[in-house]
Amino acid sequence: MEVKEQYFRMERERASITSISISISMHACLLLLALLLFIPNSETSLFTPVQKTVIITNNHTNYLSVRCFLFDNSYPVHHLKSKELFGFRFRPNSVFPSMTMFNCSTNMGAFVAYKYDYDCASDPSNKCEWRFDQNQTYLYHESMGEWVALDYNPNYESLEKGGVVKGRYTNKK
């Protein structure tokens, strides 16, 4: 009889230890989940991505009409005079940085102004600077210290969202 009682007592202790262990594990998982869900959204969080800036400069004599947007966010159309610039700031997605892609439509075409894998996305200045003239766009590469010419490469997803904006076509003489 004593052996059975001792066995049952040991089983109860083991069950008690197991339930305590499960409870601790569950609380640890809930705490980890809370950290993953709430800390990245906090402004003072170590996980909050650094704010990025996109700057677009009209480098020719015509007006440049430009509208930039993320797929859940849109900026109004800006009409830039010659040598005038427009810029905006944002924070990339902290969980999936590759989801952050700003498209811009102009009266000359459409282009991707910011992607996570652009060189400017990792530059110390946190800026992607663009210039436009009659024929091309130029993206500033801080590491090389020069403007690199790029052809307009329309992003067809951006064209579905609204396409090339109607711009002002007035030449300064």
Image (cartoon, rainbow, N blue to C red):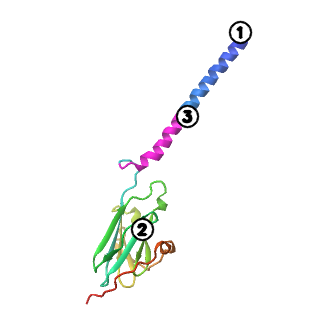
Label 3 to label 2: alpha-carbon separation: 43 Å
**Snapshot quadrant of residue 66:** bottom left
Q: Identify which amino acid the numbered label 1 is placed on.
A: Glu
Disc 2: which residue: 69
| Residue on which disc 1 sits | 2
* Callout 3–callout 2 Cβ contact below 8 Å: no
Q: Which residue position is annotated with label 3?
A: 25
Q: Which mark is residue 59?
A: none
The verdict on residue 101 being magenta is: no
Q: Residue furthest right?
A: 1
Q: Where's residue 126, x and y in %?
A: 35, 62
**Residue at mark 1 to residue at mark 3: CA–CA distance:** 34 Å
- The nearer-to-camera label among 3 and 2 is 2
Residue 63 position within the rendered picture, expressed as x and y whole percent measured from the top left: 32, 81
Residue span colored magenta:
27-43
SS at mark 2? strand
Amino acid carrying label 3: it is Ser
Q: Position of residue 105 (x, y in %)?
A: 42, 75
Residue 114 at least partly seen: no
Say if mark 1 contacts mark 3, CB within 8 Å: no
Query: Disc 3 or 2, which lies upstream in sequence?
Result: 3
Mark with earlier residue (2, 1):
1
Q: Residue at x 36, y 73 (%)?
A: 77
- List x then y, in percent, for residue 47: 41, 50
First-in-chain label (1 vs 3)? 1
